[in-house]
Image: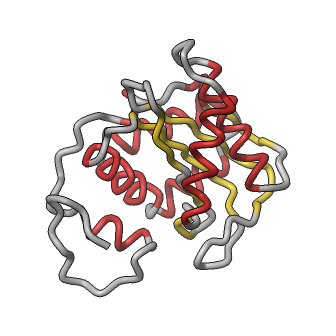
Amino acid sequence: MACVGAKTPTHTIKPKSIKWLTLFFTDYPDIIMQFSDIITSERIATQVPVASKKRALETLSELFVTCSPDTLDAHDIFNSLIARERLGTTAIDHGVAIPHGRLKNSTETIGAFVQLTNGIDCDAFDRQSVNLMFALLVPEDSTEEHLQLLARLAEMFSDSELREKLRAAADSQSLYDCLIDWDHKH
């Protein structure tokens, strides 16, 4: 797997793992934006009762439309997320998935997060059910920024203490605070 402008890691690591993403981008420490630039507490949902990956992606698509520009359409968002998912799982182990997609006619990067009531099968490499999902939508022409954010999210979700706090959070504001607090400290 090659990325324009990215340096090849010196470590041999399974390409879809959290470690691979974070090591692949260690030469890019400056993230252009903070998580607070892309997510709001209104695009976060707790204890979401879904039974499938498809329904989780539909829920995320609806969350994106809730507090986003009027130009966003839940159907277009879902199609973008599911198209990426067909290329391979976005589950990154430890019960976490980072579904992501590109949108035509979009000018901003935005995120949404769901804490699921029960884990769902997302074809994770560690075979663990996913109950935390951070979805990312980027403009169609976004490349390096998109990859940097994915690497940053992978780094964040490699923190076991944070994952447990997110699973224990009781409401959207608590989830938002956990995400933003981690981002500011790291």
* Residue 75 in the image: above or below residue 53: above
Q: Position of residue 147 (x, y in %)?
A: 32, 52
Q: Position of residue 178 (x, y in %)?
A: 50, 40
* Residue 179 in the image: above or below residue 37: below
Q: Nearer the viewer, residue 52 or 43?
A: 52
* Quadrant of the image occupied by residue 109: top left
Side (left or right) of 181 relative to 134: left
Number of callouts in the render? Answer: 0
Q: Nearer the viewer, residue 174 or 15?
A: 15
Q: Nearer the viewer, residue 174 or 50?
A: 50
* Quadrant of the image occupied by residue 62: top right
Q: In which quadrant is the N terminus drawn? A: bottom left
Q: Position of residue 44 (x, y in %)?
A: 62, 32
**How is the model colour-coded?**
secondary structure
Side (left or right) of 113 relative to 62: left
* Residue 173 in the image: above or below residue 81: above
Side (left or right) of 53 relative to 68: right
- The residue lying at 57 percent from left, 43 percent from top is 80
* Quadrant of the image occupied by residue 72: top right
Q: Nearer the viewer, residue 60 or 75?
A: 75
Q: Position of residue 15 (x, y in %)?
A: 40, 77
Side (left or right) of 67 relative to 129: left
- The residue lying at 29 percent from left, 47 percent from top is 143
- The residue lying at 50 percent from left, 64 percent from top is 160
- The residue lying at 60 percent from left, 79 percent from top is 126
Query: In the orientation shown, which residue stands out farthest toward the bottom?
Result: 12
Query: In the orientation shown, which residue stands out farthest toward the top?
Result: 70
